[in-house]
Image (cartoon, grey):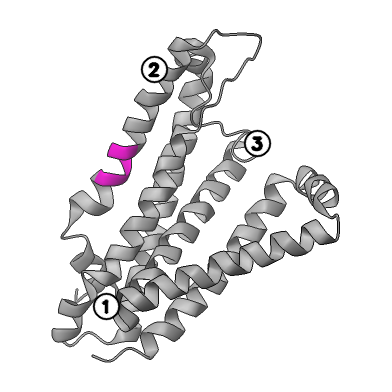
Amino acid sequence: MRSTPIVTVVRYLLLDRVTYLVLPWAWAAFGFVLDVVILRLIPAGHSDHRWVGGLVALPLVMLVVGAQSVARALPFALTLGVSRRTYFLGATALALALSVGFGLVVVIGRILEGATGGWGINMAYFRVPRLLDGPWYLSWLTAATMLVLMFVYGMWYGLVYRRAGLSGTTAFGAAQLGALALAALVATWAHGWTGIGHCLGTVTATGLTGVLAVAAAVLLAGGFATIRRMTI
């Protein structure tokens, strides 16, 4: 049976299996080992679940992988006659597939973590407080949504780089940092940090997942608008 163009793009990207399947978990494993070393050096205290944050390596690597999926692999695909729309949809499909699979691995890791008493040292590596500490199915959805968000955010950066070069990418990042700085300044002037902290403290994992999904949709729209304006 002949593959659809989108599936063909996915297969094309997965020719680099090391980047998409090995690299994220290599860094996650490094974060795991680093967490173990840190917690071995810190007194246990009274906490049942000690969290350091090594799992953050996984979404950060997904950001980089998303960027290179268009910054490095897109030009050759276009020379083969793949349309920009088809390539974007194929890369998005790969992001969804990887994120769902990786999210399942995170949930399995969390189950094993609970069964082993936090790997014998009360370590919370997969059970991220307030984010991945609810029911397994909600943690799966949250992890998958977060990973999709980071992948497509990286894709947008990669597309901006392909279209505007290093200077344009720098300006793109600076504009986002400027917007965050302005928002922080407004919150300071309005004495709103207490209210913001209270609001964040009341956000449930379900609500956070919804926010992440909306943010991912916005990033996808931005990436699609960028790739449509690229010159081949």
Task: Please name the amino acid that badge 2 sits on.
Answer: Val
Residue 86 visible in the shown view: no
- Total count of labels: 3
Q: CA distance from mark 3 to mark 2?
A: 26 Å
**Residue 4, numbered circle:** 1
Circles 1 and 3: CB atoms closer than 8 Å = no
- Rendered-image quadrant of the C terminus: bottom left
* Mark 3 lies on residue: 134
Label number found at residue 37: 2
Residue 5 image position (x, y, % from top left) = 26, 79
Question: Mark 1: which amino acid?
Answer: Thr
The stretch of residues the image draws in magenta is 23-27
Contact flag, marks 3 and 2 (Cβ < 8 Å): no
Relative to the observer, which residue lies in front, 214 or 196? Answer: 196
- Mark 1 and mark 2 in contact? Answer it, CB < 8 Å: no
Q: Of marks 1 and 2, which one's residue comes earlier in the chain? A: 1
Quadrant in which the N terminus appears:
bottom left
Q: Nearer the viewer, mark 3 or mark 2?
A: 2
Q: Residue at x 85, y 60 (%)?
A: 190
Secondary structure beneath label 1 = loop
Q: Secondary structure at mark 2?
A: helix
Tag on residue 163? none
Instruction: Answer above or below: position of 120 versus 98.
Output: above
Of labels 1 and 3, the one closer to you: 3
- Seen from the viewer's position, the closer of residues 182 and 10 is 182
Which of pointers 1 and 3 lies earlier in the amino acid sequence? 1
